[in-house]
Image: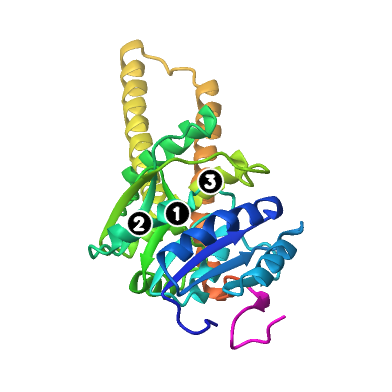
Amino acid sequence: MSTSSAHLSVVIPFYNEFENAAPLFERLLPVLNSVSENWEVICVDDGSDDDTLNALIEARKKEPRIRILKLSRNFGKEAAVSAGLQAASGQQILLMDGDLQHPPETLTEMLEIQTRGIDVVYGLRRSRKTEGRLRSALSSAFYRMFSGTSDVRIPADAGDFRLMSRRVVDALNNLPEQKRFMKGLYAWVGFSQQAVLYDVEARRSGKSKWSISQLFGYAWNGVMSFSAAPLRMWSVIGICIAALAVAYAIWVIATTLIYGRDVPGYATLVVAIFFLGGLQLLSIGVLGEYIARIFAETKQRPLFIIEEKRGFESDADE
């Protein structure tokens, strides 16, 4: 898929970023020209339904080192990132968003750090001022929960903005799983990693494509992908309920022996049945989620389908 090898590749997933594309290139291209003569920008249009693709084509007319992958539909950011990483030919690969919240100028510092033998230089937010309080609180809660349930440690406030060496990207590309949680995979592959602080800029145009419900789904995918804690949790709950049942049985027997009569328990029985039934259905649902993931993996469908490619020597260009 890749064209002739570049020294530096920049991978950018786009989804409905028509208004941000041109301003992004206005800031990014001068930075690239200042750090390397041999570079490429891999733009992945993740099934946008606005004029994002046309904006990328116009940018390519001015700068042929901009290469374009158009996916056949919206496969999601994780798939778009994977498509870009597989297409990148550089020995150093920068991954960033297309909404200008990742400042391109940080690349200079990242490259300097990587010259010390660091394989991954990831961007670490100085603050979450650009996010609402609810979203910031939920993000912090997720990182704490993930750290407590998984053997993989992901740094809080670190996202996709990172510079990676060729061997790190090759390792990521060799991972076959379908349900990808890239933040976890970046940490799982290992290698030497170091943070660089940056200020998250406000979106120049448009709004975030992630709703609260989508963020919950993303967090759930992360926990399910890197932890068996949801399964183990039900073993603990089962032990606790069994212990409570034994304690209650002892209390019933003792009360009967002392007062010489049965303890009325119709309401207690009904509540216990509904409570335990709810727990059983919930535990089956968690188990079903893991089984569904196994089912998805066995189908071995591709992560994405490329509808069109522009700027790759092995393919007919526009």
Residue in the image at 53% along x and 74% along y:
298
Q: Which mark is residue 110?
A: 2
Residue type (three-letter) at the residue carrying disc 3 = Gln
Quadrant housing the C terminus: bottom right
Q: Is residue 141 above or below residue 287?
A: above
Q: Nearer the viewer, residue 24 or 281?
A: 24
Q: Position of residue 274 (x, y in %)?
A: 56, 33
Q: Nearer the viewer, mark 2 or mark 1?
A: 2
Which secondary structure lies at badge 3? loop
Quadrant housing the N terminus: bottom right
For mark 1, does the 10 Å Cα neighbourhood hold few (<14), some (14 to 19), or many (20 or more) residues? many
If you read the primary sequence from the N terminus, does the residue marked by circle 3 or circle 2 appear first? 3
For mark 2, does the 10 Å Cα neighbourhood hold few (<14), some (14 to 19), or many (20 or more) residues? many
If you read the primary sequence from the N terminus, does the residue marked by circle 1 or circle 3 appear first? 3
- Queried whether the magenta region covers residue 102, the answer comes back as no
Q: How is the image coloured?
A: rainbow
Residue in the image at 45% along x and 59% along y:
182
Q: Nearer the viewer, residue 77 or 213?
A: 77
Q: Position of residue 201 (x, y in %)?
A: 52, 40
Q: Is residue 113 above or below residue 157?
A: below
Picture quadrant of residue 169: bottom left
| Cβ–Cβ under 8 Å for marks 3 and 2 | no
- Queried whether the magenta region covers residue 313, the answer comes back as yes
Q: Which residue is mark 3?
A: 101
Which secondary structure lies at badge 1? strand
Q: Which mark is residue 161?
A: 1
| Cβ–Cβ under 8 Å for marks 1 and 3 | no
